Amino acid sequence: MKRAFGGVEIEVVRGNIVEQPGVDAVVNAANAELMPGGGVAGAIHKAAGPGLAEECRPLAPIQPGEAVITGAHDLPNERVIHALGPVYGSDEPSDELLANCYRNSLRLAEGAGLESVAFPAISTGVFGYPIMEAAEVSIRAVAGEAGRLAGVRLVRFVLFSDGERGAFEEALENRTFE
């Protein structure tokens, strides 16, 4: 499913975030130390190789809502953007912190001259953010930032399960953004 906002195409697909060869940057749902872990962070670090952790080490720690950018190493992309999402029910205001992950990632992509970015569902795994609520916050944040972007033309949400994809498709289809 696709929709355009402010000249930026937003699409929702089911897939694996480390298998996005046509996208300039993938976003890592990072931990504060920017090191390998479980879920998305583990998959990205494994696919990128040990050079990614070495490059990340001096950039850590980061706070919820913050993002940093590195090379992609062995991934088929130019860059990896690492964003730390909020732990739901602990890091507050969780909706604003989650939205900042997307906004700050897009600003880094824009600053690096990138045209396309692929996001996972940040904070919905072990950080416990409810998927439907996360989908609405994420889509709203990206659509809201779209008008400020001059270079980024494609934002792809890459969701690992049909349930995640369905939630993001519903948020994209049923929301109006002003």
Image: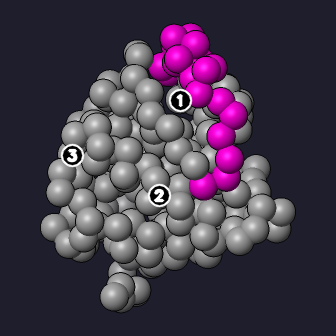
Q: Which mark is residue 13?
A: none
Q: Quadrant of residue 93?
A: bottom right
> Residue 86, located in which quarter of the rendered image?
bottom right
Direction right: furthest residue: 90
Q: Which residues are magenta?
A: 47-65
How many other residues sit within 10 Å of disc 3, few (<14), some (14-19) or many (≥20)? some
Residue 63 is situated, as x and y percent measured from the top left of the image, at 68, 47
Q: Position of residue 49 (x, y in %)?
A: 52, 13
17 or 153, nearer to the observer: 153
Judged left or right of residue 52, residue 96 is right
Q: Is residue 38 above or below residue 148?
A: above
Q: Residue at x 40, y 16 (%)?
A: 74
Q: Nearer the viewer, mark 1 or mark 3?
A: 3
Q: Residues within 10 Å of mark 1 (few under 14, many from 20)?
A: many
Q: Identify residue type, mark 2.
A: Tyr
Q: Position of residue 103 (x, y in %)?
A: 44, 59
| Label annotation for residue 102 | 2
Label 1 – label 2 distance at C-alpha: 18 Å
User: Which residue bears the numbered disc 3?
Assistant: 115
Chain-order first, disc 1 or disc 2 = 1
Considering the image in quadrants, where does the C terminus appear?
bottom left
| Closer mark to the observer between disc 1 and disc 2 | 2
Residue 49 on the magenta segment? yes
Q: Which mark is residue 44?
A: 1
SS assignment at label 1: helix
Q: Residue at x 58, y 49 (%)?
A: 66
Q: Secondary structure at mark 3?
A: loop
Q: Amino acid at mark 3?
A: Glu
